[in-house]
Amino acid sequence: MVGFLILNGRIYGNDERSDVPKDVQRGWWLYCSKRRKNGEGCGKSYSLLFYTFIKGFTIQANSLWEFLKNIWLGMNKHKAYKLSGVEITYNGIIFLWNKFIKSQSFIRTMLLKDGQPPELKTSCPAIQTIHHLKSLFKNAQCPISEFQYRFQCSFF
């Protein structure tokens, strides 16, 4: 027997729609138990985040998707922010947009594992990535959550 993963507690964090800090469960803490002296468990702790959250950010995946979907529909960043109903500041969403732009190669590489990008008459890589996400996870309410679930990695 190698070891045991033991549920060690809940991970709480801030919710973008609440002023009360640390009021929503975002995942679980696990640790790999080393029961005997010569057991092979590593003894380390691990965090397991729910796929509806983005690691390191207060914003949930579906809120970020609403913003990206509005960009895909042709809106500028300010209008996309206003119509998405995201409960973070405009500077916060611009920070996430820049993070999305910097993560293009990672996101597109992961998406290519499951399918080729659809034909699109734009040269903007960000729009192409959003369209690829939307087409690959066409039945999903939130393609970012499905991305994290399918590939078992954080979006950024």
Image: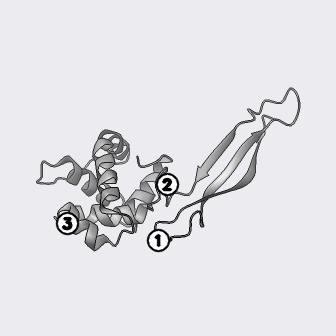
> Secondary structure under badge 3?
loop
Direction from residue 137 to residue 73 in the image, left or right: left
Which mark lies nearer to you, 1 or 3?
1
Quarter of the figure that contains the N terminus: top right
Q: Is residue 5 left or right of residue 132?
A: right
Q: Amino acid at mark 1?
A: Arg
- Above or below, 143 against 117 in this view is below
Badge 3 vs badge 2, beta-carbon distance below 8 Å:
no
Q: Amino acid at mark 2?
A: Tyr
Is there a contact, CB below 8 Å, between mark 1 and mark 3?
no
Tell me the residue that label 1 is attached to. Answer: 17
How far is disc 3 from disc 2 in space, using C-alphas? 25 Å
Q: Residue at x 49, y 58 (%)?
A: 53
The residue where tag 2 is placed is 149
How many angstroms separate mark 2 from mark 1 (CA)?
A: 23 Å
Distance (Cα) linking label 1 and label 3:
25 Å
Decide if residue 90 is on the left or right side of residue 37. left
In the image, residue 14 sits, relative to residue 156, either above or below, namely below
Q: Secondary structure at mark 2?
A: helix
Q: How is the image coloured?
A: one colour
